[in-house]
Image (cartoon, helix red, strand yellow):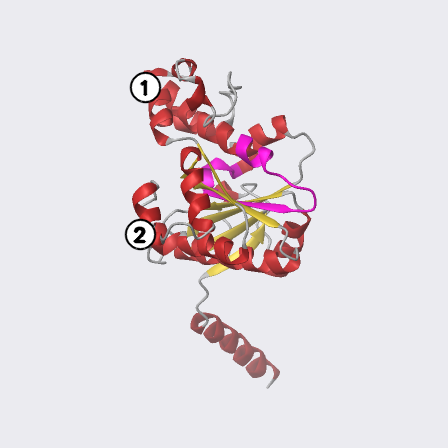
Amino acid sequence: MKYYIVSLLILIGIFTHAQKKTAYRIVNTKGNKTSYKKLLKKAAEADVVFIGELHNNPIAHWFEIEITKDLYKKKKGKIILGAEMFETDNQDELDLYLKDEIDQKAFDSLARLWPNYKTDYKMLVDFAKEKKLKFIATNIPRRYARMVYRKGFAYLDSLPDDEKKWVTPLPIAYDSTLSQYKKMRDMMPGHGGENLPKAQAVKDATMAHNIAKHLEPDHTFIHFNGSFHSAFDQGILWYLRREKPGVKTLTIEVVSQKDIRKLEPEYKGTADFIIIVDDDMPGSY
């Protein structure tokens, strides 16, 4: 009888697990399961929270708006938003939209919005607009990053003074030994391979500089960026800590796996909190 009951309980457990469809799991840097409550508590204690997204992942975008709303409540409105998806020379247009001085149609035509803006980022901007929050365009204008890829950092010295304001102060520090930059270089050997991580670095440096400029006491700056820009405490974080030693950061990364129950070894240490998403999740584009 005892054996029968134990077997029945095991079968019930297996059936229940099979019937339970979970889209994501939150784990810590070691891959141990944790909770959203703990994540939110730690996020509220940070000066800067980085959400490293997969650009076409709907769970990542849902999570971004949820943590923004919840941190807004927890911090009593003391949050600042910023994103890779907006470039520094479009800050004026972004501010005009936030102040309701231009409508969405004008914003679409004046700013270089990402193709998935309306589905994936508009809700963040509109939340900032509704709550009268600052939203910072942190990224370098893409045309400059493209030229760094072609010509290296030296190209930036040729920019007119009135355009250098859109880029991090020169000269740019650069550590080619950082593992994320080494990965990029290995993907494209030769001259292009040497400049590809430099183009990434100038984005990271510019985003870090613009975050640093807009930090405020008792506020949490939430930054939205592709996962590569903040993974393993590199990228933007490497530059931010040079500019603001002692800054308190929290990193969140979204990864996609076939099995969400156990974090794959390659993702351990990626961030303080990791959102494992089922790779069957359809992309937003």
Q: What residue type is labelled 1?
A: Arg
- Residue topped by disc 2: 105
Which one is in front, 18 or 76? 76
User: Disc 1, disc 2: CB below 8 Å?
Assistant: no
Q: Which residue lies furthest to the bottom in this view?
A: 1
Q: How crowded is mark 2: few (under 14 residues within 10 Å), some or many (20 or more)?
A: few
Residue 152: give x, y in percent of width and height: 38, 16
Residue 109: give x, y in percent of width and height: 29, 44
Res. 258 image quadrant: bottom left
Instruction: Indicate whether residue 220 is drawn in magenta.
Output: yes
Mark drawn on residue 85: none
- Residue topped by disc 1: 150
Tell me the distance, in whole angstroms, between the alpha carbons under discs 1 and 2: 34 Å
Label 1 SS: helix
Instruction: Indicate whether residue 96 is drawn in magenta.
Output: no
Q: Is residue 208 visible?
A: yes
Q: In this view, does 112 lie above or below 40?
A: above
Q: Which amino acid does label 2 sit on?
A: Lys
Q: Which of marks 1 and 2 is nearer the N terminus?
A: 2
Q: Which of marks 1 and 2 is in front?
A: 2
Which one is in front, 272 or 132? 132
Q: Which residue is drawn at 45% across and 18% down?
A: 161
**Magenta segment boundaries in residue numbering:** 209-231
Q: Is residue 64 visible?
A: no
Residue 194: give x, y in percent of width and height: 38, 18
